[in-house]
Image: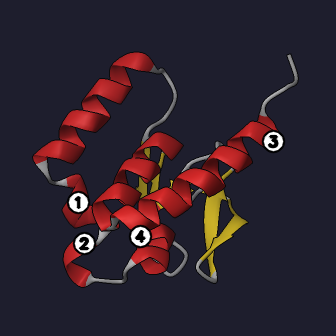
Amino acid sequence: MPTCTPALVINDTAIRFTDDKLVNLTDFWKAGSGDRAKQPQKWLRTDAAQAFIAELGKATDVSLLKITRGRFGGTFAHWQIALAYAKYLSPEFHIHCNNIIRRFVEEELPAL
């Protein structure tokens, strides 16, 4: 099981990240809607999600997805996949997450 650290809070929900910076989509789902019809595993089966992940996989050699079961498990994904999932949950949630994730990622980047 990946080590998880709450790194962000969105809509009063802690968003966990793994040590290798994968975002917990289950936490995104809870923060964004909680609608059972939009759970991460259901979205991941859509053609749009599969196409996005395949294209992202061509552009990067980092881990894109990890799915763990159990009490502290969840669906963990690359931050770009998390933002695509946020868009699926709702436009408003997507914009909110874009702003938060952008600030979070920019703080991690070294100064040029």
Task: Give the labeled residue for mark 3.
Answer: 107
Q: Is residue 78 left or right of residue 43?
A: right
For badge 1, the amino acid type reads: Trp
Residue 50: which quarter of the image? top left
Crowd class of label 2 (few under 14; some 14 to 19; many from 20; radius 10 Å): some
In primary-sequence order, the first of circles 4 and 3 is: 4
Q: Position of residue 45 (x, y in %)?
A: 16, 54
Residue 111 lies, with reference to residue 3, above or below; the image says: above
Q: Which element type, helix, strand or loop, lies under badge 4?
A: loop
In primary-sequence order, the first of circles 4 and 1 is: 1
For badge 4, the amino acid type reads: Arg
Q: Which element type, helix, strand or loop, lies under badge 2?
A: helix
**Residue name at image x 34 percent, y 18 percent:** 58
For badge 2, the amino acid type reads: Lys
Q: Are marks 4 and 1 in contact (CB under 8 Å)?
A: no
Q: Which mark is residue 38?
A: 2
Task: Give the labeled residue for mark 4.
Answer: 69
Instruction: Measure the C-alpha gap from mark 4 to mark 1.
Output: 17 Å
Q: Is residue 40 left or right of residue 17?
A: left
